Amino acid sequence: MPQSAEEIHQLARSRTDAPDLGFVEWPAFPWAVDGGRIVAKELDPPADHDRVRDGEGGVDCWRCEHPDEGVVWRNERWILSTDREGRGGLLTLWLQTREHMDFGDMGEDLAAEFGRLTLRLHNAMLALPNAGRVHLGKWGDGSAHLHVLAMVRPARLPQVIGSFAVEWDDLLPPVPEDVWQREVDEVAVVMATGDAV
Ligand SMILES: [Zn+2]
């Protein structure tokens, strides 16, 4: 995100490969094309069961089986991870517990630390050059292992705003690797500040 809005715009304009639009095939994607016009899909009838997440009950959990994958900061109870592969044009990081649990299972002491770390993470990302806002997301529909998304959206790109920033993350070209690494390092340094571990 140290890239300016102008640099992101130029990168997007000069892109020669098409963005991966695989997500339009997902059942959750709410729009369809009908006669050349975009229309809202009808709501499908209820399923028999709710979606079974990866790692439900701690069984076959990707994060538990890959405790170090993409980790850029950790203490005794938490990890912060990121992944450039398959990511879009915005910096995204994931705050997770080391121990397998769902969000609601934290308990008040761990939740208090979650609050402090989330504030530290938010402010570290907002301090990056050209950061317009930091978005936080707790959906939890993919993996059962507690994970909260933090995403920087750049300043001065009027379309990349609110929940639409998540869509634009898929559409914008990836941040150059050296820029991405620098911004990840900057956030990791701030996360380590004041940490006893
Ligand atoms: Zn797990």
Image (spheres, rainbow, N blue to C red):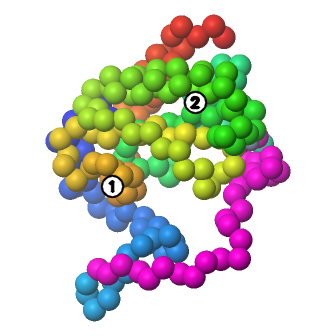
Residue in the image at 70% along x and 29% along y: 107
According to the picture, the residue beneath numbered tag 2 turns out to be 80
Nearest the viewer among 186 and 78 is: 78
For the N terminus, the image quarter is top left
- Examine the rendered structure and indicate whether residue 8 appears above or below residue 45: above
Residue type of the residue flagged with mark 2: Leu
How many marks overall?
2
- Examine the rendered structure and indicate whether residue 12 appears above or below residue 71: below
Based on the displayed image, in which of its 4 quarters is residue 16 positioned? Answer: bottom left
Q: Position of residue 118 (x, y in %)?
A: 50, 27
Disc ID at residue 75: none
Q: Tell me the element at label 1.
A: helix
User: Comparing marks 2 and 1, which lies closer to the viewer?
Assistant: 1
Task: Please indicate whether residue 6 sits to the left or right of residue 173 in the image.
Answer: left
Magenta extent = 38-64
Residue 187 in view (yes/no):
no
According to the picture, the residue beneath numbered tag 1 turns out to be 164
Name the dominant secondary structure of the magenta segment: loop
Residue in the image at 20% along x and 46% along y: 157
Magenta-span inclusion, residue 88: no
Q: Tell me the element at label 2.
A: strand
For the C terminus, the image quarter is top right
Based on the displayed image, in which of its 4 quarters is residue 128 positioned? Answer: top left
Q: Position of residue 40 (x, y in %)?
A: 36, 78
Residue type of the residue flagged with mark 1: Phe
Task: Please indicate whether residue 95 sits to the left or right of residue 75 in the image.
Answer: left
Task: Please indicate whether residue 31 sits to the left or right of residue 196 in the image.
Answer: left
